[in-house]
Amino acid sequence: MPLFARRSDGVLLSRLPGFRKMFPYLMPTRTESIIVHQQSMRMKKALAILERLNQGRTERRYTLFHILLAAGVRLMATRPENNRFVVGRRIYQRKQIEMAFVTKKELTESAAETNVKIVFEPTDTLEQVAQRIWDVVATVKKSKSSKDEDITETLTKLPRWLTRVLMWGWKVFDYFNLLPASAIKGDALYSSAYLANLGSIGIDAVQHHLFEWGTCSFFAVMGKLKKGVVVDEQGQPAVEDIITTSFTLDERIADGVNLAKTITTLATLIEDPEPLLTPLSPEQIPDPYKYA
C-alpha cells in the first residue's frame, strides 16, 4: 500500500481501472465533478405504506423522510460503488454507511440547527432506520449545545487569518490521511450521503452543491408533497400525490451507467418502499472491497 494511504474511514481501491483512477487528476475538486439529476416520484404506494405503519401511533410516526433515508441505506448496501469518496487524488471505499442531515432542537424559526450523522447497518429495514433516527434526534434535542455549535463559536472568535490557517492545516492533514479518527467521526460532512427534507418547510427540492470540505460524495434533497399530473396504468392522465427529489453525485467515484442505475434504484424504493420492510440477506450484499 502507498505511503499515507491508510484511513480510519475508508479503504483504498488500488485495483480500480486506470481510467477511473485518473478522474481525481482530471477533476481535482468535488465542485467541478458534480452530476445533478432531478426527478418527480409518485407517492401513492409510499403514502399507503406510511398510513399502515402509523396506524394507532400518536408519537414517533413514520414519514417520507424516513423512506428517503432507508432507501439511501439500501442503495449504499446493494450498490457500494456509491459509498466511495475521493481524498488526496485517490478513491476510497467507505467502511460504514453513514447518513447525515440537519435537525432543529425545537420546531421554531429561531431554534438552533445542528448536524446529525448516523451509522446504519447494510441490513437495516425502514423500521430500524426510523428507530435509529428517533433515538439520535431525541438525544440531540435534550442536549444544551452541540459539538457543531461549540466548534463554530470558538473558530469564529479567532482572528480571521488564524481560522484560515487552521482550516488549511486540517485539509493538508486530510489530504495525507493524518486526521485522527475522532475528528472524522464527529464531522457530518465525512459521510456517505447528506440528505435534506425541504418538504418539511413547505418548499420544493433544490439542486444542491457538494462540499469541498469532508468526503461526502452524495447529496439528496426531498421536496414537498404536492399534486401532479401523471400517466396512469391505462395510459391516461391522472392527478396524484408526487414529490420532486434532486440528487447530486461526485462523478469521480463511479461511471455514468452506475448513475443511471442509482437513480432508478432510489426512485423505485421511494415510490414503493415495501422491499425496505424486509432485511437484506448476506447473499444480496455485494463485496464493497472488490477493488481494494
Image (tube, rainbow, N blue to C red):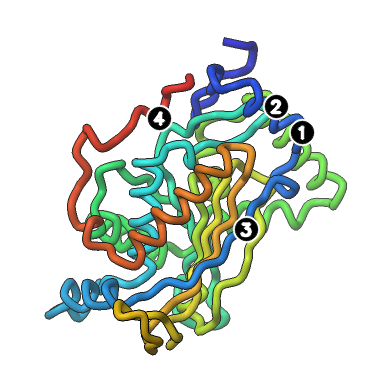
For the residues labelled 3 and 2, the Cα–Cα distance comes to 21 Å
Residue type at mark 2 is Met
For the residues labelled 4 and 2, the Cα–Cα distance comes to 20 Å
**Residue in front for this viewpoint, 145 or 272:** 272
Q: Earlier in the sequence, mark 4 or mark 3?
A: 3
The residue at which mark 1 appears reads as 26
Q: Answer whether labels 4 and 3 touch (C-beta < 8 Å).
A: no
Q: Answer whether labels 1 and 2 touch (C-beta < 8 Å).
A: yes
Q: Earlier in the sequence, mark 4 or mark 2?
A: 2
Instruction: Indicate the position of residue 198 as horizontal and vertical percent values.
Output: 52, 74
The residue that appears at 40% across and 40% down in the rendered structure is 79
How many residues crowd around disc 4 within 10 Å: few (fewer than 14), some, or many (20 or more)?
A: many
The residue at which mark 3 appears reads as 36
Left or right of residue 278: residue 246: right
For the residues labelled 4 and 1, the Cα–Cα distance comes to 25 Å
Q: Looking at the image, which residue sits at the far left?
A: 56
Residue type at mark 4 is Pro
The residue that appears at 59% across and 29% down in the rendered structure is 91
Instruction: Indicate the position of residue 169 as horizontal and vertical percent values.
Output: 75, 34
Residue 183, visible in the rendered structure = no
Residue type at mark 3 is Val
Helix, strand or loop under label 2: loop
> Mark 4 or mark 2, which is nearer to you?
2
Locate residue 14: give its quadrant.
Answer: top right
How many residues crowd around disc 3 within 10 Å: few (fewer than 14), some, or many (20 or more)?
A: some
Residue type at mark 1 is Leu
Left or right of residue 23: residue 201: left
Q: Earlier in the sequence, mark 4 or mark 1?
A: 1
